[in-house]
Image (cartoon, coloured by chain):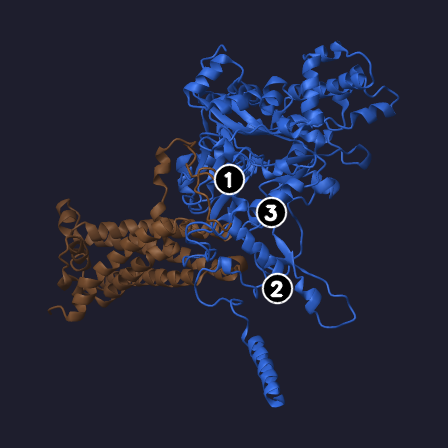
Amino acid sequence: MSPTALDHLLWGALPYVVLAILIGGTVWRYRYDRFGWTTRSSQLYESRLLRIASPVFHFGLLVVIIGHVVGLLIPETWTEAVGITDERYHVTALSLGAIAGVTTLGGIALLIWRRRTNGPVFSATTVNDKVMYLVLVAAILAGLTTTLLSAVAGLTGGHEVDYRETVSPWFRSIWILQPDVAAMAAASTAFKVHVLIGLTLFALFPFTRLVHAFSAPVWYLFRPYVVYRTRDQEPTPASRPAPRGWS
Amino acid sequence: MDQRIGKVMAQVAMVMNLDKCIGCHTCSVTCKQAWTNRPGVEYVWFNNVETRPGQGYPRRHEDQERWQGGWKRTAAGRLKPRAGGRLKKLATIFANPKMPSIQDYYEPWTYDYEHLVSAPLGDDIPGARPRSLISGDPMQIKWSANWDDDLAGGEELGSQDPIVQKIGDKVKFEYEQSFMFYLPRICEHCLNPSCVASCPSGAMYKRAEDGIVLVDQDKCRGWRMCVTGCPYKKVYFNHKTGKAEKCTLCYPRIEVGMPTVCSETCVGRLRYLGVVLYDVERVGKAAAVKDEQDLYEAQLDVFLDPDDPDVQAAARRDGIPERWLESARRSPIHLLAKRFRLALPLHPEYRTMPMVWYIPPLSPVVDALSETGHDGEDADNLFAAVDTLRIPVEYLAELFTAGDPEPVRAVLNRLAAMRAYMRRINLGEPPDESIAEAVGLTGKEIEQIYRLLALAKYDDRYVIPTAYGVDEADRGVIDEIGCSLDFDGGPGMGGSGPFGEASGTPAPASVETFHALRDRQTSDDPAGASRRFNLLNWDGNGRPPGLFPDRDRQARRHTQDGEYLHDREESQ
């Protein structure tokens, strides 16, 4: 089945639009809104639930991200070359993925419940946050669905389209500017939905509080504890040009 | 100088003379008006005055077993933030395990004043009920920044003071035996700041020129580790902007040679500001001395003598301007802390090398002695009385010298000697050098101390050089005379960007303050009630309640206007 015009639009053009929004938006946001670039933590209002839910969600998400990186970037031929059979790979990936996905979902469910039921936290929630949560939860749910469908297909012996032969080659092809539309078009509907929601999330990313992920302070590990800085040199009243005459 | 002089740095430091603090909270109020009267920092007091014994603000902040502030000396003799090193900080970044909640400070509130004028006619006089500024709901006020002011709550609250719990029955709460004094607290602008060390983003820094510790608002990402790192709990989280804020030592004023707002407005004239020169290469070692009680002396060793030609040469070598050197030579801080040893650091055991020092209070000792039939101002009687003062030396020692009573006793003796020595002069008797000698001073030095502490002239209390690069012509010039809208971007700012509260280019604090103040003074509804909407905090999304007048109210007004017009038309 050859790819339709819609396929070309979704898997050939859209990824680049999203990339442009993600990169351009982030650069713009950083230049325009460094002051608004924060986690916007609500721990001051409520920390009992947050202390459990937030690490559960974030660590779950870190595992999910690592899983995506491995699954999307490492070609099937490489894992086979080091002697990992396709079956073993999938059993590991699906079980780890399912655990991480459910953990992440549980974490975010608890976080959203806390956000809804705790008065101060709820009133600090903006529409922006709500849209972001919606897309984020949808992405996680769709991702878990693909995992579960693959697992069921594997258990019942049915034939499920392998994402490592469809989504992954397409994803890699994006970066060499030759999108393999046909590969993605051959993926199952569940994967297509998950990818579309994921693209939406990336497009929203620079405009939400999610940007705090970009400032993960890894270099803290390598800097001296105490930071010294010299004063910014700004023009002082005496050296500044005189204001206009009417004042 | 027996030690080699390393890199010389200058710091604007403060000393507070606790004998003169009357607990009027003027410093706190003026500071709040200047810096923290904005949404998100309602609960924040960069300057607060605590009654001791008492729990302080936030509650029991001195209990480092619980809050894990400051530094810890490892077995290998190195320093590491008490709440954990770099790896632990990053591992717990998703939820800070040791962060005080809003309840540990206090839930800020306002009153439903509108009800006073809008309540329906009835038999009862309407009251203004308190409403939380956090949730907007009616609330019961149960705690505040100085709830236990003047020993309010007596033993029930006072016994929760971590120092009282440590030194036990030395502190009495029976009315006849009780004591209290006031402790105004600001950020310590430490030489070895653990808040700076805790900041994963590197947004907090110590200014190289004047040692002021600041938060870069554009680099802060709201990880909240600084709040835990500071053992004095003087870094606060702005819950609207999601960024850390702290006392700035009023740097815009200091830069042009003016004292901080808290100092300027202090009615007791108990604050001193001046430059201290120190050797930055000695800080790490001094902060890591083994015995906590040696930390006070170790910190004094870090300070350099501005009259020493070697120090001056080293300071010039390290680029400290001549007028800073001159200022350091006249610095009241150097006199009080190092030369006369009257001021002591607050909680040196936190190993942060604090730079706001305190002259411990001499209790109402003269009256107490006179009542027992002794000459209350005789030097020998005074010296003997120091150990039986109403404020136990042990309590002061826990605050200022990690529990070592000797330095506190020495300070109190010097203060007592000053009283006895100056009393003779006031009575026209010949000065008695032996009084001065008994505390290791000369009569001339005592008179110098008297001038500094008792007369406390403005120019003696505040010796502040203008900042590097700031012209001497700028001394005392602050932008407040100019129009606060006169800057890049022009008028019309003061809103916020589309990414949540206070996103976008921030309005200068003066503009924000102006809007907030006007809002509060002219608004019909109590702040915090959901009906009122502060445009300053609008994230640009949707139509929050209160953005426009509600529909029925508007409709009603329209009808009335319509009828009014209608009437006029008819009458024409």
Q: Look at the picture and state if B138 lies above or below B386.
A: below
Q: Colour of chain A?
A: brown
| CA distance for labels 2 and 1 | 36 Å
- Check if mark 3's residue and mark 1's residue have beta carbons within 8 Å: no
Which residue occupies the foreground of this view, A147 or B332? B332
Mark nearer the viewer, 2 or 1: 2
Q: Is residue B355 visible?
A: no
x and y percentages locating residue B551 in the rendered image: 54, 76
**Chain-order first, disc 2 or disc 1:** 1
Q: Chain of mark 2?
A: B
**First of labels 3, 1 by sequence position:** 3
Measured Cα–Cα span from mark 3 to mark 2: 21 Å
Q: Which residue is mark 1?
A: B228
What is the three-letter code of the residue carrying label 3? Gln
Q: Residue at x 38, y 60 (%)?
A: A132
Q: Residue at x 26, y 66 (%)?
A: A193
At numbered mark 3, what does the secondary structure look like: helix, strand or loop?
helix
Disc 1 secondary structure class: helix
Residue, disc 2:
B525
